[in-house]
Image: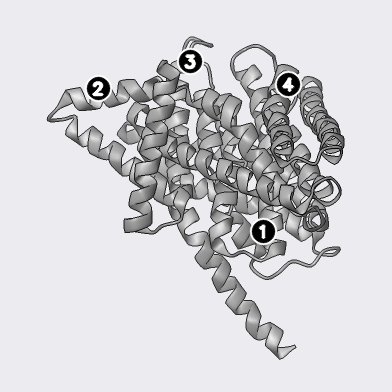
Amino acid sequence: MELFQIAAGLLTLAAVLAYLNHHLLRMPPTIGLMTLSLALSLVVIVAGYWMPGISEVARAWVAKIDFDDTVLQGMLGFLLFAGALHIDLVDLAKQRWIIGMLATVGVVSCTLIVGLLTWLVMRWLGIELPFIFCLLFGSLISPTDPIAVLGILKQAGAPRELAAKISGESLFNDGVGVVVFLGLLEIATGKHEFDLQHLSYLFVYEVLGGGGFGFLIGLVAFYMLRGTNNYQVEILISLAVAAGGYAAAMAMHISGPIAMVIAGLMLGNHGREHAMSPETQKHLDDFWELIDEILNAVLFVLIGLEILIISFNLKVLTAGLIIIPLVLLARWISVWFPVQLLRRSQEFPPGIVSILTWGGLRGGISVALALSIPSSIPEDATGYRDTILAICYTVVVFSILVQGQTIGMLIRRQLRREEPAVREE
């Protein structure tokens, strides 16, 4: 009953805030919902100074929501599957090299750069945070969030080629980032000593295992769809792939996110072309677009509410504000090198590094990973976890509210710069 009440409360709050955003703010849905949710949380915090009971009740209610389980074990599979379902595989294949490099080398290099810079900032401010936990923070903040990115790209009007780069990278680097995070978490919590061979095995097992499993369930679903001519049954099959497939992947300790991306790409392309009638395609698209919108709304409301249970102090807030530009710098470096390496074999539009840097949004997955850090192992980890969570939240709020609100403007400005060059040709 308590789970139902929490879900009902979140859905009701998301509906009310979506209504207010639509009629008053008129911001992109994800940004508007998070803005209003964050504002509501701040009002509750301020009101708590005069009426402590209000903030205590609100904090107790939010504390009941297991954010990392809700996102990583619940919403993520559906959202990644829905996002991949609408990605054109031909466009993705054209950008495979840059996407592959950004999702692997880019994530690892960004993790190392952010980890080192964070460690230096912490030492300068006198905040205790061991280097391995700084690397852990780097691993959870380095991957761009496909949930945030895909939602913003719909509003930005990005060209297909650019959208394929940004969305493709965000879908794949999420799975890679989670694997890097899990490997570093084992070291940070003392479950494993640093062992490059073990980390490499974990990476290969999770990533290749997830990809192979996603292909397998996508193939099974394809044959089931091809032998069915009933859109209700076919939608149910797609739902089983997203829910059952993700649960099975997590049970086998392989990458559920990558499995959902591969399965979604298969059904959204090969399955759509060879196994679905036009009627089924329309109903399937409508169904998954609705699922995507509902879960996105709930997720961004949740992000805004999380500030009620996050501990901030002046030093940690200062660290978060300093680290925001450092994360962007690390992102710029991790994008610039792959682009330069591939310029000889692939043509890139002017300003691509700036767009990919500013368009690399961080969102709910980073917060969920930060919350998944156990607070009891080692003994001092509670303070480390709280510090990482507060800094992570600061970066995520800036990313969604500032980068998310302005990435469309940056893309449109870049398109206007390209138009005179096209006319001259």
Disc 4 and disc 3: Cα gap in Å?
27 Å
User: Which of label 2 and label 3 is nearer to you?
Assistant: 2
Q: Amino acid at mark 1?
A: Ala
Disc 2 and disc 3: Cα gap in Å?
22 Å
Mark before the other along the chain sequence, 2 or 3: 2
> Which residue bears the numbered disc 4?
248
> Which residue bears the numbered disc 1?
163
Q: Is residue 269 left or right of residue 187?
A: right
Q: Are marks 3 and 1 in contact (CB under 8 Å)?
A: no
Q: Amino acid at mark 4?
A: Ala
Q: Amino acid at mark 2?
A: Glu
Secondary structure beneath label 4: helix
Disc 1 and disc 2: Cα gap in Å?
43 Å
User: Which of label 3 and label 1 is nearer to you?
Assistant: 1
Secondary structure beneath label 2: helix
Q: Position of residue 256 (x, y in %)?
A: 71, 29
Which residue corresponds to the image point at 47% horizontal and 29% vertical from the top-left?
388
| Residue at the far bottom in the pictured view | 424
Mark before the other along the chain sequence, 3 or 1: 1
> Which residue bears the numbered disc 2?
56
Mark before the other along the chain sequence, 1 or 2: 2
Q: Is residue 154 above or below residue 314?
A: below
| Residue at the far front in the pictured view | 230
